[in-house]
Amino acid sequence: MTNHLHREGEAAWDIAPAVLKILEQEVTPGAVTLETGAGRSTLVFAKAGARHHCVTPSQDEVARIVAQAQREGVSLETVRFHLGFSQDVLPGLKTPPLDLALIDGGHGFPIPALDWQFIAPRLKVGGVLIIDDVDLWTGAMIVDFLRGERAWREEAILRGRSAVFRLIAPFTHHEWTKQPTVVAKSRWTQTKRKAINAFGMVLAGRIGEIGGRLAHERRLAEAAKKDY
Ligand SMILES: C[S@@+](CC[C@H](N)C(=O)[O-])C[C@H]1O[C@@H](n2cnc3c(N)ncnc32)[C@H](O)[C@@H]1O
C-alpha cells in the first residue's frame, strides 16, 4: 500500500495504473528515462532499473518517495532527483539520449509544451513519450500537434487521459508552414483576417490596392515556407 506521496502526504496524484503498466513493459534495466513530476511513477522507473532523471520542485515529495522505496525494498541508486521547476531545470540538464520520457509535471500553460520542447529533441529514434492529463488543453495541444507530424506515431490514448507516442524519425524543428497541425488550425483565422482587411479596404475606397496586398501576402507565405 502506497502512502500519499503528494502535497505533504495529503494527496495522491498518482498516474493511472494503465500507464504504470506501460512503464513496466517499456522500461528495461539501464534504459535512460526522464520524468517531470514525481510520485508512484518514479518508483516504477526505479524498480525497472532505469537510469532515471526526475524533475520535481518538491523536496517533500522526494522524501516521501525515498521513504516509500525503503518500505517496498526498491533501490533508488539509479534515480537522480533534480529539485526545481522543469522550466528552470530542463534547459540546463544534461542527459544521455532518452529511451522514454514522461511529461507529468506542471499542467498550466505553457509548462507541458515547454517540457516537450526540452525533452523531445533528447529522445532516441524509437523512444517513447508519454504525456499525462491530455484531457487538459495544455496536454491536448501537444497531442493535436504530434498527430500531424510524420516523425511521431501515436501508440495509444489511455482512457482519454494519457497519450503514448513513439518517435519514429530523427527529431527536427520546422517553421510553422511545415507543421500540418499549425497550418490547419490557422487556416480559418488567417482567412478571416485577410477577408476583414480586404473588406476594410473596400469600405475605404482602396479597391485598387487589394491585388497588391494579396500578392504581398503570397510572398510572405512563400518566404515562411523556408526553414531556418
Ligand atoms: C500529477 S503529479 C505527478 C504524478 C506522478 N507521475 C505519479 O505517478 O505519482 C504532478 C507533479 O508535478 C510536480 N510539478 C508541479 N509543477 C511542476 C513543474 N513546473 N515542474 C516540475 N514538476 C512540477 C508536482 O510536484 C507533482 O510531483
Image: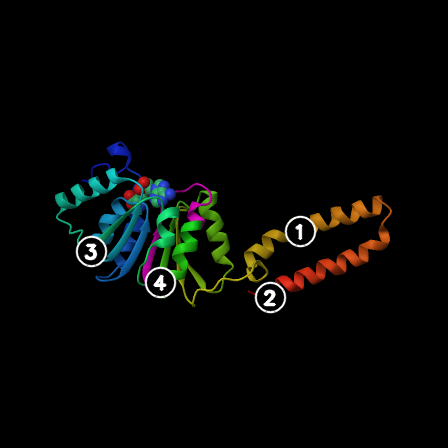
Which numbered disc flags the more N-terminal residue, 4 or 1? 4
Which numbered disc flags the more N-terminal residue, 2 or 1? 1
Quarter of the view holding residue 106 = top left
Q: Which residue is mark 4?
A: 127
User: What is the secondary structure assignment of the residue under circle 3?
Assistant: loop
Mark 2 closeness class: few <14, some 14–19, many ≥20 residues within 10 Å:
few
Which numbered disc flags the more N-terminal residue, 3 or 1? 3
Q: Residue furthest front?
A: 92
Residue type at mark 4 is: Gly
Residue type at mark 1 is: Gln
Residue 15: tell me if it is visible. no
Which numbered disc flags the more N-terminal residue, 3 or 4? 3
Q: Is residue 162 magenta?
A: no
- Mark 3 vs mark 2, CA separation in Å: 43 Å
Q: For the magenta stretch, what is the residue range?
A: 97-113
Residue type at mark 2 is: Lys
User: What is the secondary structure assignment of the residue under circle 4?
Assistant: strand
